[in-house]
Image (spheres, rainbow, N blue to C red):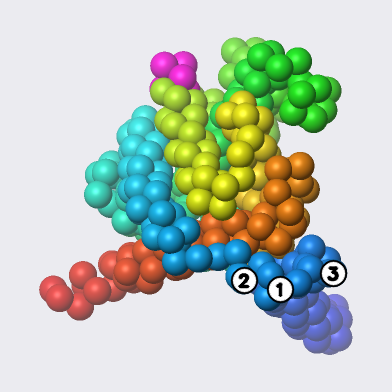
């Protein structure tokens, strides 16, 4: 005999699940802005805001704009080449360089909220525009993000070998642990051996690119991502030069790598707050706080404006199929 209260109970459970899911989504959008506001408040406490503003001049902005435009062009080209390479190797879809760069530019719009939401937007666009299964699209974005982290670790490791680590204030053990963790992960994913309970996980489609990409493409991917990191280092150098902040190149490369890693963490909106706190902390021995904050805000706001503009220009990529259907 059926329990007459069962449908009501199921409806109540479904309603609770929907409400909790909506709350979780809302928190995912609100939390980055809350974190940014809290960190900015902490970083700016005791700081003369007028003094920070006075450090920014028209000449500095004019020096920064060409560097920013070059960085955007180079970085977008690298992003497009990486997407084309990974997607083409999947054998499940074909994507042109033009389409890859357009959907990457479109993903900047949501990526301004945080890196994770931007990665989700890029996965969605790869799925919709290139026809790649959603899990494989997420896997393609995942492998590129993983190699971003790998390239940062490689750069920091090289600097440690050149300086011994102490000169740049880097915890060698942490770098080695993260690097070994990535290597171990690739070994588990690519090992031609049965691994029991790990087999079900490593054969998920989201790990397909990491598991099946030929070694030569992995090396090429590392090279491309290193190129992206170097382009960001040069962009930051242009800011430091504009504000007359002088420090050794190796030290700067390591500090910028750390800065790039922290600002990419999906905890703050567009890296605001985290970027300023880390910038001031790392470069504290080379300029006063007001100058460092002025340089940091110029870099962050310049990137936000540029990426917001590109995201708006290519926002139609989110509805490209609908627009095409309307024309038929």
Q: Which residue is mark 2?
A: 53
Residue appearing at x 65%, y 21% in the figure: 159
Quarter of the image for residue 266 reads bottom right
197 horizontally vs 107: left or right = right
Q: Residue 215 appears at what percent x and percent y?
A: 46, 16
Q: Secondary structure at mark 2?
A: helix
Position of the C terminus by quadrant: bottom left
Quarter of the image for residue 270 reads bottom right
219 horizontally vs 181: left or right = left
Q: CA distance from mark 2 to mark 3?
A: 15 Å
Q: Is residue 236 above or below residue 113?
A: above
Q: CA distance from mark 1 to mark 3?
A: 9 Å
Q: Residue 202 appears at what percent x and percent y?
A: 64, 30
Q: Is residue 204 above or below residue 305?
A: above
Q: Check whether the beta carbons of the residues at disc 2 and disc 1 lie within 8 A of each other.
A: yes
Q: Residue 10 appears at what percent x and percent y?
A: 78, 78
Q: Which residues are magenta?
A: 214-219
* Membership of 201 in magenta stretch: no
Q: Which residue is mark 1?
A: 49
Residue at the limit of the structure toward the left, as seen here: 328
Q: Which residue is mark 3?
A: 46
Q: Main secondary structure of the magenta part?
A: helix
Residue 72 in sight from this viewpoint: no
Quarter of the image for residue 75 reads top left
Q: CA distance from mark 2 to mark 1?
A: 6 Å
Q: Residues within 10 Å of mark 1 (few under 14, many from 20)?
A: few
* Membership of 218 in magenta stretch: yes
Position of the N terminus by quadrant: bottom right
Q: Residues within 10 Å of mark 3 (few under 14, many from 20)?
A: few
Q: Residues within 10 Å of mark 2 (few under 14, many from 20)?
A: some
From the viewer's side, name the closer residue of 295 and 70: 295
């Amino acid at each position: 005999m059926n329990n007459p209260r069962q449908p009501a109970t199921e409806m109540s459970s479904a309603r609770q699940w929907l409400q909790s899911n909506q709350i979780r989504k809302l928190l995912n959008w609100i939390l980055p802005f809350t974190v940014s506001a809290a960190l900015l408040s902490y970083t700016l406490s005791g700081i003369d805001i007028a003094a920070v503003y006075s450090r920014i001049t028209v000449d500095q902005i004019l020096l920064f704009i060409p560097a920013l435009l070059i960085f955007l062009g180079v970085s977008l080209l690298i992003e497009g080449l990486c997407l084309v390479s990974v997607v083409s190797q999947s054998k499940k879809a074909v994507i042109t360089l033009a389409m890859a760069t357009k959907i990457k530019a479109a993903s900047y719009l949501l990526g301004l909220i945080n890196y994770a939401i931007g990665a989700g937007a890029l996965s969605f666009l790869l799925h919709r525009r290139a026809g790649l299964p959603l899990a494989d699209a997420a896997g393609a974005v995942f492998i590129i993000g993983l190699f971003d982290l790998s390239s940062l670790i490689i750069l920091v490791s090289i600097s440690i070998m050149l300086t011994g680590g102490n000169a740049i204030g880097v915890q060698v053990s942490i770098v080695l642990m993260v690097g070994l963790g990535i290597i171990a992960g690739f070994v588990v994913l690519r090992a031609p051996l049965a691994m029991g309970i790990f087999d079900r996980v490593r054969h998920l489609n989201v790990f397909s690119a990491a598991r099946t990409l030929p070694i030569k493409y992995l090396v090429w991917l590392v090279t491309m991502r290193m190129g992206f990191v170097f382009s960001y280092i040069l962009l930051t150098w242009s800011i430091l030069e504009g504000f007359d902040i002088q420090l050794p190149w190796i030290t700067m490369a390591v500090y910028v790598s750390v800065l790039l890693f922290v600002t990419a963490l999906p905890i703050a909106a567009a890296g605001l707050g985290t970027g300023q706190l880390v910038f001031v902390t790392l470069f504290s021995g080379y300029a006063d706080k007001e100058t460092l904050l002025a340089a940091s805000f110029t870099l962050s706001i310049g990137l936000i404006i540029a990426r917001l503009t590109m995201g708006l220009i290519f926002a139609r990529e989110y509805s490209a199929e609908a627009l095409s259907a309307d024309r038929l």
